[in-house]
Image (cartoon, grey):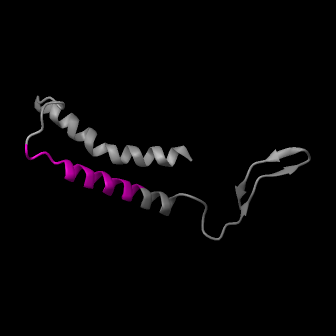
């Protein structure tokens, strides 16, 4: 359950990291006082869009195929059988 959350958090932080790297390559200090034109709202919007795209792709391509049956974990001959989709 932690992996999807981490994936979405990385997608949200990605525009901020790219902006910080861009500032470093331009020779500016990322911790310096920001100019008036700092694109903070744009970075937040890009982060939210990346998260939305990641959620949409995860929902579309993740999981079991349509029409498959879920078999929950159960015990067979004293051994735990992992859950599966058939």
Residue that appears at 41% across and 55% down = 54
Residue 82 located left or right of residue 21: right
Give the x, y percent position of residue 30.
18, 32
Could you tell me how many numbered marks the image carries? 0
Residue 27 located left or right of residue 54: left
- Of the pair 43 and 73, the residue shown nearer to us: 43
Q: Which quadrant holds residue 17?
A: top left
- Determine the residue located farthest toward the bottom in the rendered image: 67
Question: Against 13, is 48 above or below?
Answer: below
- Residue 51 falls inside the magenta stretch: yes
Residue that appears at 58% across and 59% down = 63
- Of the pair 34 and 47, the residue shown nearer to us: 34
Q: Which quadrant holds residue 20?
A: top left
Residue 41 located left or right of residue 70: left
Give the x, y percent position of residue 3.
52, 44
- Of the pair 1 and 34, the residue shown nearer to us: 34
- Residue 50 falls inside the magenta stretch: yes
Q: Magenta segment, which residues?
A: 36-54
Q: Main secondary structure of the magenta part?
A: helix
Residue that appears at 49% across and 61% down = 59
Question: Against 48, is 9 above or below?
Answer: above
Residue that appears at 16% across and 48% down = 39
Give the x, y percent position of residue 26.
11, 32
Residue 30 located left or right of residue 85: left
């Amino acid at each position: 359950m932690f992996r999807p959350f981490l994936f979405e958090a990385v997608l949200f932080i990605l525009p901020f990291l790219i902006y910080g790297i861009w500032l470093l390559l331009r020779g500016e200090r990322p911790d310096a006082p920001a100019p008036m034109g700092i694109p903070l709202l744009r970075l937040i919007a890009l982060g939210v869009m990346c998260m939305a795209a990641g959620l949409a792709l995860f929902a579309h391509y993740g999981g079991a195929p349509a029409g498959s049956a879920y078999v929950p974990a159960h015990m067979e001959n004293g051994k735990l059988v992992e859950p599966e989709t058939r």
